[in-house]
Image (cartoon, rainbow, N blue to C red):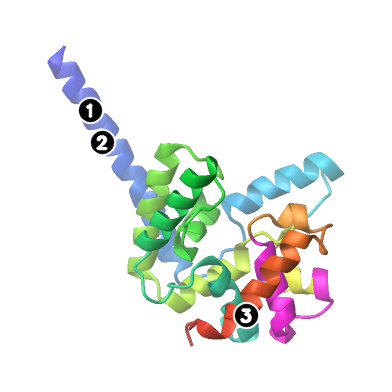
Amino acid sequence: MVRWLWKGGLILLILVLYVQLAFLAGVLWWGHFNPSNTAFMAAGLDRLQEKKGADAELRHKWVDYPHISIHLKRAVVAAEDSRFLDHEGFDWEGMEKALEKNLKKGKIVAGGSTISQQLAKNLYLSPSRNPLRKIQEAIITVMIESLWSKRRILEVYLNVIEWGNGIYGAEAAARRYFKGPAAHLGPGQAAHLAAMIPNPRYYENRRNAKGLLKRQAIIQARMNQVKVPR
């Protein structure tokens, strides 16, 4: 019995290591090549096709870092991860504050996830809050932070996150909401897009929602206080 348990444990360990090596290979690859699809995009396409039919397609176009407005870079960092340049993947202080806020409200109202953690989840995982998924997210976050520059992390993040039903990345979002390229976004427009990130599908058709406009104003006021990669 002990022998079979030992063998089973060894097989499980080998499988876990194999999975981690597969994730590592993906992180290494996407450190140099631009992802055209992600786990969240695949889920979004399934959702869209279920609603609109098999011919429905995502709106997504990659744009390199220099062609994304500095205002959007600052707005997203101000909104999602103000300590982005200082931490190594995890903002422990931010997590502590989020936990305190959630305990006070008696429900989840704040996340505390960094841009790197969100990117790990978007690229490879599901939106579930399963503890095993969170552990895997942390492992991938360490890989990304160890192997990519902060500039690359922000570049990929801005190109793959969701900004509405079937809308992914800064270029598609800029054209959908402001009829122009991501390079031309002004401060107010950038703050508006950043304010949508927590719930983009909801806000796509509620762009004058009181909560969204309030968050936009807060982000715009903070934008020039954060630093972003050159």
Amino acid type, label 3: Ala
Judged left or right of residue 183, residue 154 is: left
Q: Which residue is mark 2?
A: 13
Give the image quarter of residue 122: bottom right
Using residue 24 as the reference point, say whether residue 163 is left or right of it: right
Identify residue for label 3.
221
Q: Main secondary structure of the magenta part?
A: helix
Residue 164: x and y, percent?
A: 74, 58
Looking at the rendered structure, the kind of residue marked 1 is Gly
Q: Is residue 173 above or below residue 140?
A: below
> Residue visible at 69% across and 71% down?
216
Q: What secondary structure is found at the residue carrying circle 3?
A: helix
Q: Residues within 10 Å of mark 3 (few under 14, many from 20)?
A: some
Q: Which residues are magenta?
A: 176-197
Residue 214 on image: x %, y %: 71, 67
Mark 1 — residue? Answer: 9
Q: Residue sitting at 33 percent across and 44 percent down?
A: 18
Name the N-terminal-most of marks 3 and 1. Answer: 1
> Is the C-beta separation of discs 3 and 2 under 8 Å?
no
Q: Vertically, is 139 above or below 8?
A: below
Q: Are marks 2 and 1 in contact (CB under 8 Å)?
A: yes
